[in-house]
Amino acid sequence: MFADTPSPPYLAVIFYSRRGGQDEGYAETAARMESLVQQQAGYLGMEAVHDEQGNGITISYWRDEESAQAWRAHAEHAIARARGNAEWYDAWSLRVANVERDARFERET
Amino acid sequence: MFADTPSPPYLAVIFYSRRGGQDEGYAETAARMESLVQQQAGYLGMEAVHDEQGNGITISYWRDEESAQAWRAHAEHAIARARGNAEWYDAWSLRVANVERDARFERET
């Protein structure tokens, strides 16, 4: 469930989105991006939750600014983003943040 | 939909959680916390998505470390967190991060 991130500091890219009615190609592209991102140098993991109304939050974690920028510059990812704006997303916000500390809880079973 | 945050820098508190079967009191406490947090000095907004399987991501935004810490120290919030660990959550992770830049997209209608 949890992204297995190392000790801070590292980078978090917070993507909050709302999808509209047009879904053609979305699932395939999302799966392809999820596969591609895992091959990126400096990629540390991802956490995502999507609801039934089309809202989603996806947080990807990166070793540093350089690795996050390299993913942004990836040609296939850039094409997917452009298609997202043209077809899939009604709105999104993106925030890039430096993680300074973290904590974790798991119930003992 | 979007938290109406000011220009960076500001703080993001990223809370990723998985709830178990025990839900008694959860909705009331969540509503109470949502109301309380809005009265906190330095609170800038919140974005949250929850799915049908009990997974949730809630990101609260804060002016600075002091305001985030004051909310953490709020007595009623502390009690709610303790109850969360004892009853509602199977697991969670929390990350505190400095937002450095942001971007936003909204489809023109």
Image (cartoon, coloured by chain):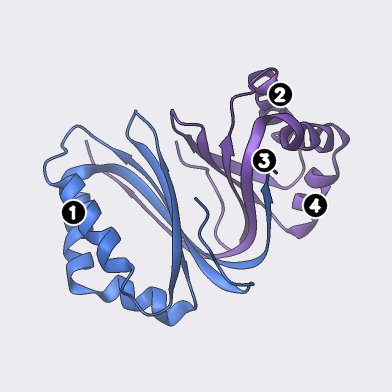
Chain colours: A purple, B blue
Contact (Cβ within 8 Å) of mark 1 with mark 2 = no
Please give the chain letter of the residue carrying mark 1: B
Query: Residues under labels 4 and 3: Cα distance?
Result: 31 Å
What residue sits 15% from the left and 36% below the top? B22
What residue sits 53% from the left and 54% below the top? B2
Q: Amino acid at mark 2?
A: Thr
**Screen quadrant of the C terminus of chain A:** top left
Residue located beneath label 2 in the image: A29
Q: Is the same chain shared between marks 3 and 1?
A: yes
Query: Residues under labels 3 and 2: Cα distance?
Result: 24 Å
Please give the chain letter of the residue carrying mark 4: A
**Screen quadrant of the N terminus of chain A:** top left
Please give the chain letter of the residue carrying mark 3: B
- The label number, if any, that marks residue B29 in the structure image: 1
What residue sits 23% from the left and 66% below the top? B77
Residue located beneath label 3 in the image: B109
Residue located beneath label 4 in the image: A69
Q: Amino acid at mark 1?
A: Thr
Q: Earlier in the sequence, mark 3 or mark 1?
A: 1
Query: Residues under labels 1 and 2: Cα distance?
Result: 38 Å
